[in-house]
Image (spheres, helix red, strand yellow):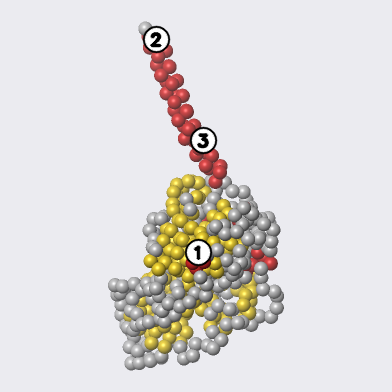
Amino acid sequence: MLRARRRRWRTRVRTRTLVAVVAALALLVPVGWMWADSLVPTPYSVMDMGTPDFGGGPGEHAGHAMTGPAVDTLREPPGPADVDVTLEARVGRVTLPSGRVIDGYSLNGTTPGPEIRAVEGQMVQVRLVNADVPEGVTLHWHGYDVPAGDDGVAGVTQDAVPVGGSFVYRFRAEQVGTFWYHSHQVADPQVRGGLFGALVVTPRAGLGDTGDVLAVTHLHEGRRTINGFDGEVAAPGAPGSRVRVRVVNTDNGPIQAWVGGAPYRLVAIDGTDVVGPTPTTDSLSITAGARADLEIDLPADGAGVRVELGGSALTFGQSLPPTPRPPRQLDPLTYGTPAALGFDPDAADRRFDYVIGRRPGFVDGRPGLFWTVNGSLWPDVPMYVVREGDVVRMRIDNASGDLHPMHLHGHHAVVLARDGVPATGSPWWVDSLDAQDGHTYDIAFVADNPGLWMDHCHNLAHPAEGLMAHLVYEGVTTPYRVGDVGGHTHNDPE
């Protein structure tokens, strides 16, 4: 009897063990497959990542890794420059213009780096020197549609500049407006740490009697600064004069801006003039990476004016206490006067979807909760393929549970509609779009700048979690690789 019980007990134990092993294998085998499938070689070419998406245009069956011009050949030729600047990148203790000392990065000993200012039509040349940044550096010209070879993305358009090395960027200042530059090598820590500065291009005819004031905002070690100064910053402006305040948001999230003491006009968004701007007292959301030019007529009696910028303020005239945020927010979809776009978005040659989601999985072997593009985890994301001259439409659908400031390199796009509601104001041109959760945005642009371009979230922690894709012109290739490429160079654009 006892022996029979023992045999039955052993049988039950073996059966349960076998069931547990089978169940574990049923779980671990697909998980292991997903883990292995997520691994990418190092180094790798972005040309080999992703799934080609032709948007219904020609080339559906031709493949996208075709022989053509290499991205590093799409550059301005050498020659004299009207604006010639050298920027030296360093890491370590940095003294802000306010006098506060932080641990971070600097360009020519300061952060923000020097303002680069040019006049429309001038040739700009910037020599970047890496003094001692061990992980390497680059410079990306955010919002400026430079030739592709000067876009400054490590592993895509160039190798990161190693310690002791240099790289020369050249571009013609054909776009008038407010822009900025920043590192695109391990971009999240380097930009947060201070590797950035402003780029301003003024029209040939000048700004007349309008004052020109720069306001570069940044969180330096958790404290909001304007041009490197903490708290309130006094700005020049005579009573009764008109000033143009160029706001640059260099952070990972949006800031709210408004003006106390006077109305303002939103005269430019992301470096493009607004048609028919009207006076307003509404607040304005400026997303990560975006710029907004505010034009203010200062009171003739010298009364104070405050431009509130995310917890800091730019002040004019007499002292004015902080002003509460207005109850209404300006909507660029309806602000200003309609005008011709110069192309017909309804006759688009390519139509793409960029659906942002989130789900658990593996990215390059790392388990976690990651962003998805069109339902897939990186690197199985779209490679949007176009030809020069194409009219391109794209629908951005954010169903991810978070806000994403979407940034397309090398191009400006016009917002046609939000949630299916057509734009009725001035053409709303952007290079950094505040794609809010639960909303859709229809945008369009002309493919007029051949190259290989990133299209990613500018909360710079998010691309490292998979929120990036690329726009490639058919036939364009790159000789660069992401990862260890020999010597002391490791290309890591995010």
Query: Residue under circle 3?
Result: 29
Assess whether mark 2 and mark 1 are in contact (beta carbons under 8 angstroms).
no
- Identified by mark 2, the residue type is Ala
| Quarter of the rendering occupied by the N terminus | top left
Q: Which residue is mark 2?
A: 4
Rate crowding at label 1 as few (under 14), some (14 to 19) or many (20 or more) other CA atoms within 10 Å.
Answer: many
Query: Residue, x 45% and y 30% (percent of image)?
Result: 23
- Disc 3 marks a residue whose amino acid type is Val
Callout in the foreground (1, 2): 1
Gap between marks 1 and 2 measured at Cα:
75 Å
What kind of residue is marked 1?
Answer: Arg
- Residue position marked by numbered label 1 in the rendering: 393
Query: Looking at the image, can residue 129 be seen?
Result: no
- Cα separation, mark 3 vs mark 1, equals 41 Å
Q: Position of residue 390 (x, y in %)?
A: 57, 66
Residue 103 image offset from top left, x and y in percent: 50, 66
Task: State the residue at coordinates (64%, 54%).
Answer: 62
Query: Badge 2 local density, few (<14 within 10 Å), some, or many (20+)?
Result: few
State whether residue 192 is above or below residue 126: above
Q: Is residue 413 above or below residue 351?
A: below
Residue shown at the point (50%, 68%) measured from the top left = 345
Q: CA distance from mark 2 to mark 3?
A: 37 Å
Q: Position of residue 406 (x, y in %)?
A: 47, 63
> Quick one: label 2 or label 3, which is nearer the N terminus?
2
Question: On the rendered image, what quadrant is the C terminus found in?
Answer: bottom right
Q: In the depicted view, which residue is nearer to us: 132 or 271?
A: 271
Of tags 3 and 1, which is closer to the observer?
A: 1
Pinpoint residue 383: horizontal percent, then vertical percent: 56, 56
Disc 1 secondary structure class: strand
Find the residue positioned furthest to the front. 347
The quadrant where residue 310 appears = bottom left
Q: Are marks 3 and 1 in contact (CB under 8 Å)?
A: no
